[in-house]
Amino acid sequence: SSSWVYALVYMVSIIFFSYFYSSLILNPVDVAQNLKKMGSSIPGIRPGKATSEYIERVSNRLTFLGAMFLGLVAIIPTAVESTLNVPTFRGLGATSLLILVGVAIDTARQIQTYVISQRYEGMVKQ
């Protein structure tokens, strides 16, 4: 039962810190002002306060979805361990999975960039 309490506290902490980080990084008022200064707007949304409110609403929804996904990925090893009484998931934590996926995506992007640069290099030489 303590593992379920741990998982719940872990999930709530992930959600809290996701919202905290999002509020530190994204300021909807600044984004709305920058859009207005650049002469840009979101289709169907008036510049100014309406844009700021829209950005905040969308940001909150995306933060919630991201936090839930991150929380689920983080507690899956703990849930499987406590449900099946199998300690094999101790080494395979959520952090390891996130790092692995991040490195794989970054490697794929670097390979794609290299392939594209080779194509352009071939075009320039001709």
Image (cartoon, rainbow, N blue to C red):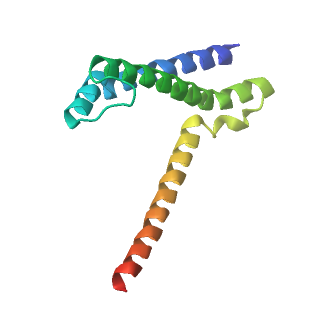
> As drawn, is 79 to the left or to the right of 62?
right
Place of residue 116 in the rendered image (x, y in percent of width and height, measured from the top left): 44, 68
Determine the residue located farthest toward the left in the rendered image. 37
Image point (52%, 29%), residue name: 66
Q: Quadrant of the C terminus?
A: bottom left
Residue 61 shown left or right of residue 35 in the figure: right
Above or below, 2 against 72 in this view is above
Query: How many numbered callouts?
Result: 0
Q: Residue at x 67, y 32 (%)?
A: 77
Report whether 72 appears left or right of 15.
right
**Residue 30 shows in this picture:** yes
Viewer-nearest residue: 16 or 44: 44
Q: Is residue 32 left or right of residue 91?
A: left
- Measured from the top left, where is residue 118 in percent x and y? 43, 75
Give above or below for 72 relative to 93.
above
Residue 20 visible somewhere in the drawing = no
Q: Quadrant of residue 53?
A: top left
Residue at the extreme right of the image, as rendered: 84
Residue 25: x, y in percent?
Answer: 33, 29
- The one of 88 and 67 positioned closer to us in this rendering: 67
Residue at 55 percent of width and 48 percent of height: 100
Residue 114, quarter of the rendered image: bottom left
Quadrant where the N terminus is found in the figure: top right
The percent coordinates of residue 113 (x first, y second) are 43, 64
Q: Is residue 22 above or below residue 5?
A: below
Up the image or down, 50 lies above or below 120; here it is: above
